[in-house]
Amino acid sequence: MSAARGAVVVAAVAPEPRWGLGAREAEARLRQHGPNTLTREQPAPAWRFLARQFRSGMVWLLLGACGVAALLGEGADAVAIATIVVLNALVGFLQEYRADRAVLALRALTAPSARVLRDGVSAVIPASQVVPGDALVLEAGDVVAADARLLTAHALLTLEAALTGESTPVDKQVGALPDSTPLAERRDRVFMGTSVAAGTAVAEVTATGMDTELGRIAHLVRSAQVSQTPLQQRLEGVTRMLLVLCVVVGA
């Protein structure tokens, strides 16, 4: 949003003096809540995702059994064990790699900047500096920088396909729907990562960063990196059986 168009939008929505924050209060809230970003570890090369699959003691036990089988001339057993290890590593690698890239894709949805009311004046700031209580000024073409409750809206339509799967623009109106309202039906809210298709609005920020709906999705995606797939659980069960067999044979 250009400065000129931003001034037009602010004039059109006629913001009230009580909307928005002062500069000092905004700084205090930024320290309290942290930057308005989807947190993510530093990008890791693919080989690190693969290396993580060999941290389990079970994997090293299988590799040891594979080596012993090979030394004893049990080629079929060695190949079978090696296959289990490779499958386990491949499944884990693909799961973590895809989850990492999915978080990157979610971050790409976020806005680089936002127009807010600070000390009663419209100002464009980096989206990372948006805090709860800020008053977002929105117009067509804007990407919403944080989750927010509408204070005023004029013919506002938003695109929420990335968040709710809704393919058509969603009509937004000022209201007071309860927090228990399903996400796709919260007509009085706008959400981080969605975009404004038409209209203008001012909205009070209610959540930033990982506390937003988009942040919750990012958290779920990241959690998938540490959960086991059914195949991995079965492979771990096979490993335990092999361990028991080794103990029985050794006895």
Image: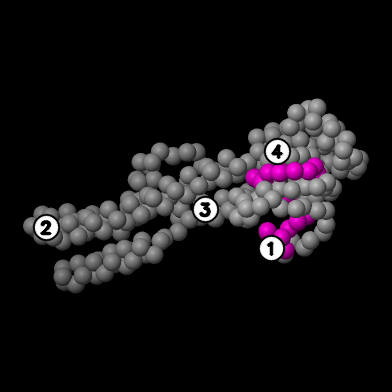
Which three-letter amino acid code belongs to the residue tagged 2? Gly
Q: Mark 4, residues whose alpha carbon is within 10 Å: few (<14), some, or many (≥20)?
A: few
Dot 4 or dot 3: first in sequence order is 4
The residue under the point 11% across, 57% down is: 75
**Badge 2 or badge 1: first in the primary sequence:** 2
Magenta segment range? 181-201
Task: Say which of 158 and 87 sits in front.
Answer: 158
Q: Which residue is mark 3?
A: 221
Label 2: which secondary element: helix
Type of amino acid at the residue the image marks with label 1: Pro
Q: Secondary structure at mark 1?
A: loop
Q: Secondary structure at mark 4?
A: loop
Which label lies toward us, 2 or 3? 3
Could you tell me which quadrant the N terminus lies in?
A: top right
The location of residue 87, given as percent across then percent down, is: 29, 56
The quarter holding residue 133 reads top right
User: How far apart in space, not on screen, are marks 2 and 3 (Cα)?
Assistant: 40 Å
Q: Quadrant of the C terminus?
A: bottom left
Closer to the N terminus: mark 2 or mark 3? 2
Amino acid under disc 3? Val
- Residue at which label 1 appears: 182
210 displayed left or right of 22: left
Question: Disc 2 marks which residue?
Answer: 75
Q: CA distance from mark 3 to mark 1?
A: 20 Å
Residue receiving disc 4: 141
Q: Pick out the residue farthest to the front.
A: 168
Question: Can residue 77 be seen here?
Answer: yes
Alpha carbon distance from label 1 to label 4: 25 Å
